Image (spheres, helix red, strand yellow):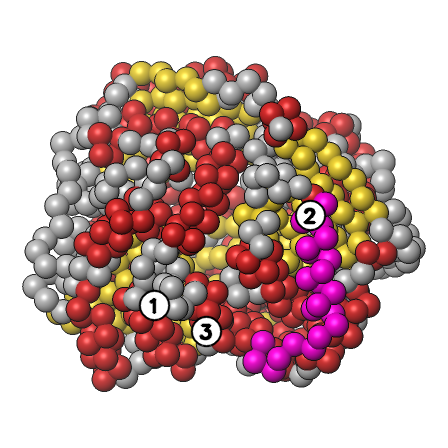
């Protein structure tokens, strides 16, 4: 059970306070309700580029990192398709430094041309390092537009291509800030050994005078229901053939979301999972195979991915995979298998919540979904899933007409073979 | 409120370091136990004298991947199934000088999990089927790695850094995956695991009695006699370039053989290392990322071994920036030798490092790891009180003295890949 208190400032900033008396550290976590899904299709990668610019100095403070380091702290951030999250960890005595810095960059950025120019280059190098200069690095750049036709999940957080980042100009930066970075679009969590009154006073002091703006209503293109099996084959200079089966799944708030999560574990989380045993251990068709969900707020994906063994062709593998999926959907799993999934989830959750930062980030995330208390209800939801739920959901989701398949063929093998 | 004025700061004067309880299993092998855990999580680590310097051509690494591979009557799948049913997580890892397995679980399940690990490993036979599968998987992973400039650079760096000692300098080659003999693996497993346990670390809210049970359970695996490790290393200096035609980025490594926590200059050097590349505002980050935008990241580190250590700078940059980046790294090291670090910068680093040390001691898991990283060198937690003193007392002159002593460009091994 994670305890917390909640309050909202007059300007619309939602605040969560989580007390932990055992730690000398404090966390200040800020979640902004903006991600790559809020970008225009002609300017992708912007939410993430913007995250970099948030460290380039704010209206009253020329440098973000140095004052925080001087307070013994450190900071970082991440952007996803759904949201942008900034965190600071520092000795609790110096928490005001983090509030001072975070509140000033919520008030306004410095918008220096040098910062934009440099961070454009840094992000281009990040693009190369993560997506282009790695074997299989670009598969998500290919898989997203295959799986999604309308919804902005069709582009990756880093952007569709490097050109979009190169073309970003200061006017875009200002507009993005004005639209998405204000109190009503943020959730703040403070965690550490403090009292509620103290936290309220501190938050009021630093955030109370930030002008309020109306929260934008998010209108995204709805992804049409998929009706046919989609496939694409790409050729790359990689050592082994690889596969990515992506099945559409319900949005985060749908009760079926949790069932699909458990179902993906049953298929391919551990070495005792269905696909691992049947396709790798028994039939020896692939060298690795895993199943997981993308965890998105809107309609996400359940992905089965892995690499083929040398000498195995896609036809043979795909037939075996669909057979395995059919068995999984046709025969209800044992209670023991269900127990196994839930036990694993329970251990993961306990370890995840061990860390103060994780607790703070998750509280913000559940508040974004609608209620911070979701963090305390999750385990029970998993525990209530039955073997029949799993079977019904498998039958409706794990079908070819709900699937997009990306094949990566190793060019060298082609030539040699 | 004037937003231009920073809030007042408090500096950290002392940190509560907490010792684990220590149990002697034999003369050299100990169990360390940290019991103050405010939740139901627990972790048990078993350390073995089974690093890559032991055994030929990848033997140590293959064996490390086979620990739960079972035998003719109990399959690896069955073992995984039982492990998962108890909600447990098993990790095994290997370094140059040692191997470690970690079991993560809720406290209530740990006894059954440890029984399972003990039984499975005791009866493991390196079956032909499991060995062949592992070798094939590893070979494919190796081929994927060969496509990464980061991997190529690290491999070549290690080779040249440890050049004076071939058992440390050897790098994985394609022929590691041919003609692997199960009998060699079994022999290694018996010598280095079933008779190679060097340390146990337990974090979790367990009773004293249960710790005794753990000792009884794994006691028969302890290594008799001391572990021996090499010393007096010398890196092969100069530039070594690895070619990779189609790369968009080049990976760069710059470094040299250095010392570990037992050396009187260690604590002070760690502060110098921070200035160079071990925090977001470091000299290298400020110059090569935040000023020039050549890279997504650049950092430096000090790695420790039993009898020595090494210093390394690592980055991946756009291939057109390779030469200029090396020039800038050289420039930054030289600047630290010739110019005093401004007081403001050093004060910031002092505060930052004290905050980081406080964080490293926060919670039972961090505290255990902090303790063990001193214990491996025969040092106690007082080492970290010395670190605090070193941070508080260091001067710009001392930083310059260390830079002159240890950061000459002529002593560096420089590797590029891509």
Q: Return the residue at label 1.
A: B120
**In which quadrant of the rendered view does residue A268 lie?**
bottom right
Q: Nearer the viewer, mark 1 or mark 2?
A: 2
Determine if marks 1 and 3 fall on one subunit. yes
Q: Residue B157 vs residue A209: left or right?
A: left
**What whole-number distance in Å separates the C-alpha atoms at marks 3 and 2?**
31 Å
Determine if marks 1 and 2 fall on one subunit. no
**What whole-number distance in Å separates the C-alpha atoms at marks 1 and 2?**
34 Å
SS category of the residue bearing label 1: helix
Q: From the top left corner, tell me how far across and down residue B341 is, in percent.
A: 34, 30
Q: Return the residue at label 3.
A: B82
Near-viewer residue (B157 or B130) = B130
Does the magenta segment cover residue A117?
no
Residue at 37% in and 18% down: B240
The reply to whether residue A101 is in sight is no
Query: Of label 1 and label 3, which has the lower sequence position?
Result: 3
């Amino acid at each position: 059970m994670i305890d917390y208190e909640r309050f909202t400032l007059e300007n619309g900033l939602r605040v969560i306070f989580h007390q932990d008396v055992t730690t000398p550290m404090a966390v200040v976590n800020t979640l902004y309700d903006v991600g790559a899904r809020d970008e225009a299709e002609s300017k992708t990668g912007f939410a993430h580029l913007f995250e970099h610019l948030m460290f380039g100095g704010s209206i009253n403070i020329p440098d973000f990192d140095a004052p925080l380091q001087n307070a013994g702290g450190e900071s970082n951030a991440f952007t996803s398709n759904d949201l942008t999250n900034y965190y600071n960890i520092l000795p609790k005595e110096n928490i005001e430094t983090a509030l001072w810095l975070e509140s000033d960059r919520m008030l306004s950025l410095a918008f220096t041309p040098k910062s934009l120019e440099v961070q454009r280059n840094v992000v281009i190098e990040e693009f190369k390092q993560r997506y282009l200069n790695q074997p299989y690095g670009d598969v998500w750049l290919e898989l997203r537009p295959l799986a999604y036709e309308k919804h902005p999940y069709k582009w990756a957080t880093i952007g569709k291509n490097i050109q979009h980042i190169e073309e970003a100009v200061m006017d875009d930066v200002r507009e993005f800030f004005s639209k998405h970075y204000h109190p009503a679009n943020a959730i703040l969590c403070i965690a550490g050994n403090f009292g509620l009154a103290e936290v309220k006073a501190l938050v009021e002091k630093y955030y109370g005078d930030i002008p309020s703006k109306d929260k934008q209503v998010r209108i995204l293109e709805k992804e049409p229901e998929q009706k046919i099996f989609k496939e694409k084959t790409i050729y790359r200079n990689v050592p082994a053939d690889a596969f990515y089966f992506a099945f559409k799944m319900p949005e985060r708030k749908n009760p079926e979301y949790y069932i699909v999560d458990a179902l993906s574990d049953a298929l391919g989380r551990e070495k005792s999972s269905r696909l691992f045993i049947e396709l790798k251990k028994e039939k020896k068709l692939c060298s690795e195979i895993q199943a997981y969900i993308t965890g998105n707020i809107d309609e996400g994906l359940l992905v089965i991915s892995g690499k083929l063994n040398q000498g195995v062709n896609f036809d043979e593998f795909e037939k075996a995979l669909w057979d395995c999926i059919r068995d999984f959907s046709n025969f209800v799993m044992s209670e023991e298998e269900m127990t196994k999934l839930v036990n694993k989830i329970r251990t993961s959750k306990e370890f995840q919540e061990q860390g103060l930062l994780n607790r703070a980030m998750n509280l913000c995330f559940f508040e974004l979904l609608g209620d911070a208390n979701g963090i305390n209800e999750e385990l029970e939801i998993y525990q209530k899933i039955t073997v029949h739920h799993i079977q019904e959901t498998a039958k409706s989701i794990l079908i070819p007409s709900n699937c997009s398949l990306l094949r990566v063929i190793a060019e060298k093998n082609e030539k040699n073979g | 409120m004037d937003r231009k004025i920073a809030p007042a700061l408090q500096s950290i004067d002392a940190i509560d370091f907490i010792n684990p309880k220590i149990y002697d299993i034999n003369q050299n092998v100990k169990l360390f136990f940290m019991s103050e855990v405010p939740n139901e999580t627990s972790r048990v680590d078993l350390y073995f004298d089974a690093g890559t310097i032991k055994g030929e051509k990848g033997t140590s690494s293959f064996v490390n991947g086979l620990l739960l591979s079972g035998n003719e009557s109990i399959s690896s799948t069955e073992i995984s199934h039982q492990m998962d049913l108890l909600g447990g997580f098993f990790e095994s890892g290997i370094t140059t000088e040692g191997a470690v397995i970690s079991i993560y679980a809720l406290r209530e399940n740990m006894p059954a999990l440890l029984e399972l690990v003990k039984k499975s490993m005791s009866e493991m036979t390196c079956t032909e089927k499991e060995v062949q599968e592992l070798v094939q998987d590893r070979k494919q992973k190796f081929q994927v790695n060969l496509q990464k400039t980061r991997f190529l650079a690290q491999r070549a760096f290690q080779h040249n850094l440890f050049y004076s000692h071939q058992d440390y300098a050897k790098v994985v080659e394609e022929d590691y995956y041919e003609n692997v003999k199960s009998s060699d693996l079994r022999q290694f497993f018996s010598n280095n695991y079933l008779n190679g346990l060097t340390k146990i670390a337990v974090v979790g809210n367990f009773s004293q009695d249960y710790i005794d049970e753990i000792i009884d359970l794994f006691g028969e695996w302890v290594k008799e006699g001391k572990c021996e490790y090499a010393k007096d290393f010398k890196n092969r200096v100069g530039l070594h370039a690895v070619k990779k035609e189609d790369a968009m980025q080049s990976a760069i490594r710059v470094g040299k053989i250095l010392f570990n926590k037992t050396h009187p200059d260690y604590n002070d050097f760690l502060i110098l290392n921070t200035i160079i590349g071990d925090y977001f505002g470091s000299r290298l980050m400020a110059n090569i990322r935040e000023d020039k935008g050549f890279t997504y990241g650049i950092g430096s580190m000090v790695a420790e071994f039993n009898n020595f250590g090494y210093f390394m700078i690592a980055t991946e940059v756009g291939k057109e920036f390779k030469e200029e980046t090396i020039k800038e790294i050289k420039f930054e090291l030289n600047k630290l030798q010739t110019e005093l670090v401004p007081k403001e910068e050093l004060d910031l680093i002092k505060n930052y490092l004290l905050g980081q040390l406080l964080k490293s001691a926060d919670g039972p898991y961090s505290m255990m790891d902090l303790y063990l990283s001193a214990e491996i060198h025969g040092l106690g937690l007082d080492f970290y009180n010395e670190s605090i003193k070193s941070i508080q007392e260091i001067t710009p002159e001392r930083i310059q003295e260390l830079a002159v002593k240890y950061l000459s460009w002529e002593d560096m091994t420089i590797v590029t890949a891509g």
